[in-house]
Image: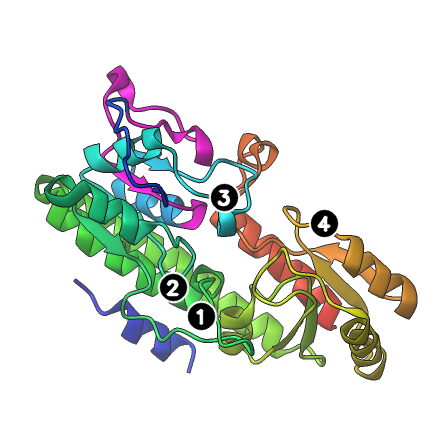
Amino acid sequence: MRNYRGALLTRRAVVRTGALGLLGAAASLAGCGGAAPAGGGSSKVVTTIYPLAYLAGRLLGDESRVSCMVPAGTEPHDWEPTPTDVAAIQSASLFVYNGAGLEGWVSDVLSSLGAEAPRSLCATDGVALRTAGSGTTDPHVWLAPSLAVTQAQAIASALEAALPDQKDAIRGNLDALMADLLQLDQDYSARLGACPRKEIVVSHEAFGYLCDAYGLTQVGIEGLSPDSEPDAARMAQLVDEVRSHGVTTIFFEELVSPKTAQAIASETGAQVQELNPLEGLTSDELSAGETYLSVMRDNLAKLEAALS
C-alpha cells in the first residue's frame, strides 16, 4: 500500500452486564444515515462512530454496507450497545472502533463473544495519542485530517484482509479518499497558518489533535468530558483568558448545551459559534447530505473567521 503518510509530511512540513442475549438480526445503518444492505442481509462492516463509518463507506464504495452503532444526534462518550448491537458486531466481517477510551465497552463485548468475535480494528492503533491536562487520553483523532489519513489507511488494510476479493476496488477507493484528505489537510495548514490569532475557546476539549497539527491552542470550558461543568473559579479564569487574549468567539457544539459558552460570551462581549467535533452528525445534517468533508470545511471557515 502506498505511503500516504510520507506524502502528507512532504506536502505539509455489554455492555457492562454479565449475560448478553445475542439476537440474530444485525443493526441497520440508520444511526449514521445510511440504508440497510440490499436484501436485508447483515452489514459487512460495523463501526462505532460516524467518522469511521464515513471512511469505511468511502473505501468500500458503498455506504449501505457499513453500519454505525451510535445513533444520529447521540453523544457517544456515554453510549453503550444493546444486545441487538452486539449481534450486529458478531455477524460483521469487520468491526471498527476508535479506541483511546472512547468506547469503554468494547473489550467486554469482544470478550463476551469469545471465538465468535469478528475480525476487529482499533482505528487509533499506531497513532501517537495525546493526553489532556487531567491525564485522560484524547480520542478525537479524526479532527486532524493528517491523522484521518492514518485511520483510513488502517481501515483499508483491515478491509483488504476481511474482504480479499475486493482488494483492488478498496485500493482504488483509497487513492480517491487520500486525495480528498490530503487536500483538506493542505487547506487547513495554509488558511489557519495565515491567521494572526492562535487561541480558540471550545465547550469541550475535542480539538487538541487539530490544534496540535495547525499551530493552535485550545482552551476548554469543560475538559474532555462534555458533561462536566466549570466551577465559579474556572469560569472567572476563562473570562480573564478571553479578555486578555482578545478572543472574539466562544465555540460550542450541537450535542452539548451551549449555556456555559453563552454565559462567558455574555460576560466578555464575544459571540458564540457552533464548531462540530464530528462525533456524530444529526439526522437533519445527514438528510441535508452533510459528510465528514463538508463539515470539516465548514469548521475551517468558522475557525478562520474567528482567528482573523
Kind of element beneath mark 4? loop
Q: Is residue 162 left or right of residue 37?
A: left
Sequence-first tag of 3 and 4:
4
Disc 1: which residue: 137
Task: Kindly give the residue lying farthest to the front in the view shown.
Answer: 18
Horizontal and vertical percent position of residue 274: 70, 53
Sequence-first tag of 2 and 1:
2
Q: CA distance from mark 3 to mark 2?
A: 23 Å
Q: Is residue 203 above or below residue 84?
A: below
Q: Is residue 105 above or below residue 36?
A: below
Sequence-first tag of 4 and 2:
2
Q: Quadrant of residue 267?
A: bottom right
Label pair 2/1, CB-CB below 8 angstroms: yes
Q: CA distance from mark 4 to mark 2?
A: 24 Å
Give, as a three-letter code, the residue at label 1.
Thr
Disc 2: which residue: 100
Label pair 3/4, CB-CB below 8 angstroms: no
Q: Residues within 10 Å of mark 2 (few under 14, many from 20)?
A: many
Give, as a three-letter code, the residue at label 4.
Ser
Q: Which mark is residue 291?
A: 3
Asked whether residue 279 is in view, the answer is no
- Which is closer to the viewer, label 1 or label 3? 1
Q: Is residue 168 left or right of residue 8?
A: left
**Range of magenta residues:** 26-51
Q: CA distance from mark 3 to mark 4?
A: 23 Å
